[in-house]
Amino acid sequence: MKTKAKRKAGTMAKAKTEVTVEDATETDIEAVREIYTHHVLNGLASFEEEPPGLDEMRARRAEVSRQGLPYLIAKREGRVLGYAHASPYRARSAYRFSIENSVYVRDGMAGSGIGGALLDALLARCEKGPWRQMVAIIGDSGNEGSIALHRSRGFHKVGTLRAVGFKRGRWVDTVFMQRELGAGSATLPPSATSAEAQAS
Ligand SMILES: CC(C)(COP(=O)(O)OP(=O)(O)OC[C@H]1O[C@@H](n2cnc3c(N)ncnc32)[C@H](O)[C@@H]1OP(=O)(O)O)[C@@H](O)C(=O)NCCC(=O)NCCS
């Protein structure tokens, strides 16, 4: 799918970047790792402090795919400029209709619509699946880019955990944002048995 990444007039004056959003393949993971490494080492969005190696990044993508969840990249002229994927929100079974998202854009390319294009595509894909809630767990309450990105795609802020992280010499908050997928909690998921439904 081809998406013209666009910005509203008056926001950071960066040129829009036309990107193609597609499923990541094994060969894209090296570029994905490069993008993520920058944010692990220089940012507070991820609470990882040591960049994972290539094998680990490949294993993470394989696990996302095994769960039937999307792992997408944004490309322009063959170059990976960002990536986004979903993952289970938490492992215990009752969380099975809730997923978490991750979006990272290449250093120097933020603010040109790539994150928005990725999140739009991720949401569209996840709405086709059985999941009903998407949670964004954002490192750093000062992460205006991520908070604005999620707000612009219908997420609302549900809370902030204060100082749960310590990275790069300071305490770091975690902001939780949430968005319903499909019918959200308005209907039971298709797989709920009548016994489950009666118990609710
Ligand atoms: C957060 C991030 C993914 C956003 O991607 P991006 O390509 O910069 O975002 P976009 O240019 O597509 O902007 C998306 C929306 O957010 C808004 N926005 C983006 N950055 C903003 C900023 N710094 N301040 C205010 N608004 C901002 C835009 O106005 C846009 O809204 P619109 O689509 O309604 O016009 C990117 O900046 C990034 O990789 N940051 C570092 C890692 C990170 O924080 N990842 C998120 C982990 S939860």
Image: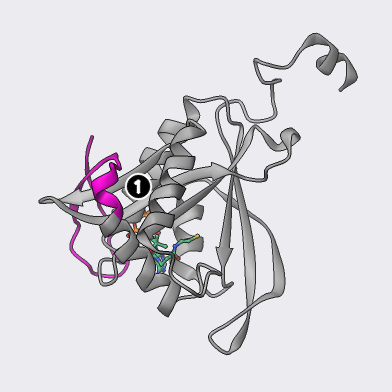
> Residue drawn at (44%, 48%), measured in percent from left and top?
59
Quadrant, the C terminus? top right
Q: Position of residue 167 (x, y in %)?
A: 57, 81
Magenta stretch: give its range: 1-29
Q: Position of residue 108 (x, y in %)?
A: 26, 72
**Residue 17 shown in magenta:** yes
Q: Is mark 1 within 8 Å of ligand 1?
A: yes
Where residue 187 sits, quadrant-wise, is top right
* Up-down relation of residue 60 to residue 131 (above or below): below
* Up-down relation of residue 190 to residue 172 (above or below): above
Residue that label 1 marks? 118
> Residue drawn at (48%, 33%), measured in percent from left and top?
66
Neighbor class of circle 1 (other Cα within 10 Å; few <14, some 14-19, many 20+) is many
Amino acid at circle 1: Leu
Number of numbered discs overlaid on the protein picture = 1
Residue that protrudes farthest toward the front in the picture: 55
Q: Is residue 112 left or right of residue 42?
A: left
Looking at this view, is 130 or 87 the one in front? 87
